[in-house]
Amino acid sequence: MHFYPRILVRSHKERFLQIYPWSICRPPTGVSRLHSSCTVQPNTPFVAAEDVRRARKPYNFGRYNKRRVAFRVAYIGWDYHGFARQKLTTRTVEERIFDALLETKLIDSTRNCHWSRSARTDTGVSSVGSVVALDVRSRLPVSRGNVPWQTSRHDAINADVEPINDQSSHLVAGELPYVIMLNKVLPSDIRILAWAPVPPTFDARYDCLHRTYKYLFDPSGLDTTKMQRAASQFVGVHDFRNFCKFAKGKPLAAYRRAIDLVSVNRLTDIEDRAFESNILAGRLYCVTIRARAFLWHQIRCMMTILFLIGRGLEDESIVGKLLNVEPSVGKPMYGLADETSLILADCAYSDIAWYDASASSLGPAGSLDNMSQRKSADAWLLSQLRLEERKAALKGFMIRSMLETVGHSIDTSLIGRDDYLRDDRRFGGGISAYTKIMERKRLEPIESRMAIR
């Protein structure tokens, strides 16, 4: 008879506890099969490694100084509900910029960054020249024109800092690359073009000298000569209550605005060559309008009247009649010109030196220092803009293909060119029989609406 020694067979639980005596609640990653046989002790919390990584300390803004800066912003507004932040939607350009500022830790809150904007464009309106100003984090010392992070607004304005001018390039050398940081996290249809150091008292809205808008349009069926003659009547100081939307709380005096320039030119004839490379540039026209400030929907109302004049539906004298405001007579009812053709082209300021994407630590835009690095940053920005251009061109190609398909399946002899040109929907109206502007129903006079409110 043979006697065999007793073999000790240990359970999974016993082996696990012998190997990992420091944890009796959950095995490490990779031995989850043993977890089912492990008795979980009550009131013994388990903190995973990924939870530890997430529970990081709050960002210590107190380690940094802050400075007031201005950003030059470009965006395609077609997919946004305007520029300014709104309560009922988060799909605004300003909301996206705030998200980027918070993500890059340039601000700790949107409430105390002392934000100001040069203009608040409507839904669908784009821009290549908007300007915003705010206080952001800086890595430069106080001696270089900054103030400590906890400095109040009042103390920052009264602080003894070096004044900023065109020769203050040493105040930005070694600064954070604001343009690159923000563009990396912003949507591709919103770009920061440049930044500038500004005084603590700078306000993007009230310090703006003038704003320039451009409205692009196809001149098919329009007499652009008549449009130019009519547009010249807008220049000067006038009451534009018949060329805007009523704004609650605005006094009557605020409807008087000074227009510096209104011109109608072929796109290739204007000094601004920004759109010259576009495939439509040869046949597009541009209305350029410049003033210090505009009323709500003012430019789109002006464009509606100019289009009606260009189509021969209204005489050039209609501009003067609408500018000659009669007391207690409301605005005639008419539609708005399409918003997607409107672009905020420029917001002008005095004594501001702009720095591009590669100039944050290299010097003013246009200098020859570190040219290879500068070209690299500029090439990145251009590549992003060209990507958006290719997307738009592809969309246009798809729409043209759809038009060709529809054209083959519909009897186009039933639709004359004159019917298309009479379609007011191209210019903010409908397709019914045309009624002269001065013969249309009128809105309630502004004086009455103000009295009610």
Image (cartoon, rainbow, N blue to C red):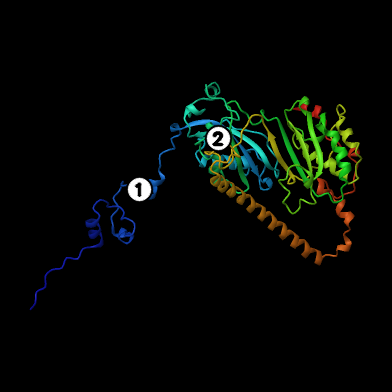
| Badge 1: residue crowd in 10 Å (few <14, some 14–19, many ≥20) | few
**Residue displayed at 53% across by 34% down:** 172
Where, by quadrant of the figure, is residue 26 drawn?
bottom left
Please give left or right for residue 152 compared with residue 448 in the image: left
Q: What amino acid type should be assigned to the residue bearing mark 1? A: Val
Q: Residue 275 at what x, y percent from top left?
A: 72, 48
* Of the pair 382 and 411, the residue shown nearer to us: 382
**How far from the left and from the top, in percent, is residue 298?**
77, 36
Front residue of 109/163: it is: 163
The residue pinned by badge 2 equals 110
Circle 2 packing at 10 Å, graded few (<14), some (14-19), many (20+), is some
Q: In this rendering, would 142 be left or right of 393?
A: left
| Disc number for residue 47 | 1
Q: CA distance from mark 1 to mark 2?
A: 33 Å
Do callouts 1 and 2 mark residues in contact (Cβ within 8 Å)? no
Outermost residue toward the left in this view: 1
Residue extending furthest front?
A: 368
